[in-house]
Image (tube, rainbow, N blue to C red):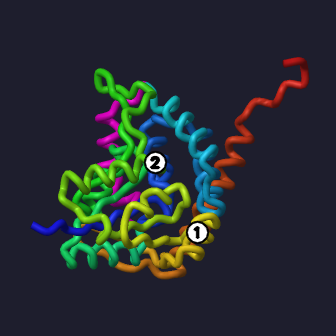
């Protein structure tokens, strides 16, 4: 029996327009898992990430900070929050071009996988929501239903490629006939693992690599409102208005936080 092909999609800035973890920050805030200060810092970090990308050292600091933050959280509560707010949070920030590509690969008989360093509690339901067969994601250690602050698996960089190769052997996939999509140079091992690498909204490092190697470069920009009953495009004006709302909320949050902070001490530390 001949091996089949697959398509592997990175998630953040490739399929959806925001970092998936920070997209749920407001939902976590409403449920009391994060503070207003962390919410504002998360929005600011999200805007920097969208504008400039993130280096490996920055991502590592964010990973360690997130592990410390989530220590003691209830896994079932996180799963419930994601399930209840998935459509509201992710529906309006999905790239139309990505949705269409996923559909095309499925119609061609290729298995579709969503690959992300984000937690499996977010990536797995999102992958099902988008019609993918499976998710490849980071897995946190849990004891008595609570996060311990440790990771069992970090689906980042070379680990993504290693997991893809494992899945290819398990599922009988021909990686030489498979596709991979990503925006980040950190996913170079994943892109090199397949015969058809494609870069999407690439950071500067990945753009240079793509130009040197002659890889296709795609620009995803049109958002869709994805719902269980279908999807519809978001008008350009709506996208601009949404960006303005996010920026306004960020500035308002900074102002409120600054006003409520106690004055800095002028004495010795």
Q: Residue at x 18, y 59 (%)?
A: 172
- Residue 215 at x, y percent in the picture: 49, 76
The single residue placed furthest to the top in the displayed view is: 268
* Quadrant assignment, res 71: top left
**Above or below, 168 relative to 201:** above
Q: Position of residue 31 (x, y in %)?
A: 42, 39
| Residue at the extreme right | 267
Q: Which residues are magenta?
A: 72-92
> 4 above or below 78?
below
Taking the image as drawn, is residue 2 in sight?
Answer: yes
Task: Name the residue nearer the viewer: 255 or 52.
Answer: 52
The secondary structure type at the circle numbered 2 is loop
Tell me, for residue 209, which label it has, or none: 1
Q: Is residue 79 magenta?
A: yes
| Alpha carbons under labels 2 and 1: distance apart | 19 Å
Q: Which quadrant holds residue 204?
A: bottom right
**Which quadrant of the rendered structure holds the N terminus?**
bottom left
Instruction: Point out which mark residue 9 bears.
Output: none
Q: Is residue 135 left or right of residue 72?
A: left
């Amino acid at each position: 029996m001949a091996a089949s092909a697959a398509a592997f999609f990175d998630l953040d800035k490739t399929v959806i327009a925001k970092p998936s973890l920070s997209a749920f920050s407001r939902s976590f805030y409403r449920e009391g898992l994060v503070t207003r200060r962390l919410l504002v810092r998360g929005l600011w970090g999200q805007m920097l990430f969208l504008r400039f990308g993130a280096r490996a050292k920055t991502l590592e600091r964010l990973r360690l900070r997130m592990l410390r933050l989530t220590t003691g959280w209830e896994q079932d509560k996180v799963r419930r929050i994601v399930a209840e707010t998935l459509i509201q949070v992710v529906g309006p920030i999905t790239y139309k071009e990505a949705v269409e590509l996923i559909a095309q690969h499925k119609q061609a008989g290729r298995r579709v996988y969503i690959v992300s360093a984000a937690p499996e509690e977010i990536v797995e339901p999102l992958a099902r929501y988008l019609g993918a067969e499976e998710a490849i994601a980071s897995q946190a250690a849990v004891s008595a239903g609570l996060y311990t602050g440790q990771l069992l698996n970090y689906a980042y960089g070379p680990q993504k490629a290693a997991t893809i190769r494992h899945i290819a052997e398990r599922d009988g996939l021909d990686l030489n006939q498979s596709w991979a999509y990503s925006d980040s140079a950190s996913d170079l091992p994943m892109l090199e693992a397949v015969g058809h690498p494609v870069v999407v909204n690439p950071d500067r490092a990945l753009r240079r690599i793509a130009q040197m190697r002659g890889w296709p470069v795609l620009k995803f920009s049109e958002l869709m409102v994805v719902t269980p009953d279908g999807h519809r495009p978001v008008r350009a004006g709506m996208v601009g208005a949404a960006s303005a709302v996010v920026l306004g909320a960020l500035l308002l949050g900074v102002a409120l936080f600054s006003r409520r902070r106690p004055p800095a001490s002028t004495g010795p530390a």
